[in-house]
């Protein structure tokens, strides 16, 4: 088996038993919760499980990933037990045009949980990066899986928890420890994130994926660090868009007012230029 490049195991493990007892209950969205010591990517594992017919609400958590996936073809890595890295399998019955709100929903849930448990003031860079100041604390990757029938979507989150400054993957990243969080215990953090996802997901699916009716758009805008700012958006295919971010549409696209009118962006890397006046 491929060895981890890290030797520092001076960090407490997650408790599958306690997490399962707290989260996997009759009537709960979460149907099973598994913690593994290591894997390639929890998103890849749950995509395989989805194709094999795994039910909605399957949760996979890992202490270490050797091939963690990020948005836009990037990677995600962290020393063992230093972060929260998990994926959930969801099968939302909402119109396909509204599915773009699901990763935003998970971002809102993460931000709420981190604020409450860790007492760190986080905001969301569109679509769903959790920022402390302008530095990235967590990211979300949603991947659609073709498993026949309803849409199956695997949503994964990586949250930097106890990484020291020298362990951060890039200078623009941060961790709860670096931000002097009130709590860096991953069990309560994971419980809070999953409970927040469940709460928003129930409201959103009950509203047929309508982000306004579910109160999701207002929650997202309240947490947004992007809307109202001047932005540069690096679009797929080396194109760049500049303008002012004005909102998020019913599909979860970022609306940007440019010199040529308003554009709806469905994918890309946002760079905050400076506050809009
Ligand atoms: O900001 C990003 O680019 C998204 C990062 C998402 C990382 C998480 S870690 C758990 C899950 N499994 C993966 O392979 N990726 C996501």
Image (cartoon, helix red, strand yellow):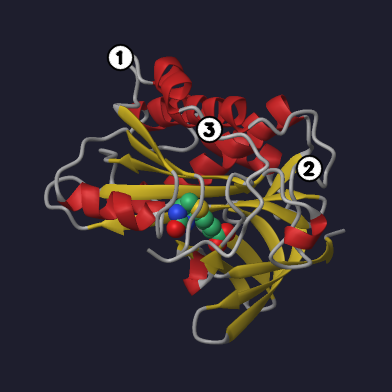
Q: Nearer the viewer, mark 3 or mark 1?
A: 3
Category of crowding for the residue at label 3, using alpha-carbon neighbours closer than 10 angstroms: few (below 14), some (14–19), many (at least 20) = many
Q: Which mark is residue 57?
A: none
The quadrant the N terminus occupies is bottom left
Q: Which mark is residue 177?
A: 2
Q: Is residue 227 visible?
A: no
Please name the residue that numbered disc 1 is placed on. 27
Q: Quick check: 257 left or right of 181?
A: left
SS under mark 3: loop
- Number of numbered discs present? 3
Residue at 78% across, 42% down: 177
Residue at 44% across, 51% down: 38
Please name the residue that numbered disc 3 is placed on. 14
In the rendered structure, which disc, 3 or 2, sits on the residue that comes first in sequence? 3
The quadrant the C terminus occupies is bottom right
Residue at 63% across, 46% down: 9
């Amino acid at each position: 088996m491929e060895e981890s490049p890290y030797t520092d195991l001076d960090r407490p493990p997650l408790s599958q038993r306690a997490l399962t007892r707290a989260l996997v209950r009759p009537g709960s969205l979460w149907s099973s919760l598994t913690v593994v010591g290591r894997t390639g990517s929890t998103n890849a594992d749950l995509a395989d499980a989805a194709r094999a017919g795994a039910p909605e609400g399957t949760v996979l958590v890992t202490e270490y990933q050797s091939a963690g996936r990020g948005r836009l073809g990037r990677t995600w890595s962290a020393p063992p037990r230093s972060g929260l890295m998990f994926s959930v399998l969801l099968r939302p019955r909402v119109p396909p045009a509204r599915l773009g709100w699901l990763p935003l929903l998970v971002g809102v849930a993460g931000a709420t949980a981190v604020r409450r448990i860790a007492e760190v003031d986080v905001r969301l860079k569109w679509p769903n990066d959790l920022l402390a100041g302008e530095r990235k604390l967590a990211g979300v990757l949603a991947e659609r899986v073709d498993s026949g029938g309803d849409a199956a979507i695997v949503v994964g989150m990586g949250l930097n928890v106890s990484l020291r400054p020298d362990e951060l993957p890039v200078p623009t990243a941060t961790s709860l420890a670096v931000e002097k969080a009130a709590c860096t215990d991953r069990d309560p953090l994971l419980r809070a994130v999953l409970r927040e996802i469940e709460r928003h997901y129930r409201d959103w699916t009950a509203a047929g994926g309508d982000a306004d009716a579910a109160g999701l758009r207002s929650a997202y805008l309240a947490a947004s660090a992007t809307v109202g700012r001047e932005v540069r958006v690096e679009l797929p295919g080396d194109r760049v868009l500049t303008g002012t971010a004005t909102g998020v549409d019913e599909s979860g696209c970022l609306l940007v007012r440019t010199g040529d009118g308003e554009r709806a962006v469905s994918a890309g890397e946002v760079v905050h230029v400076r506050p809009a006046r």
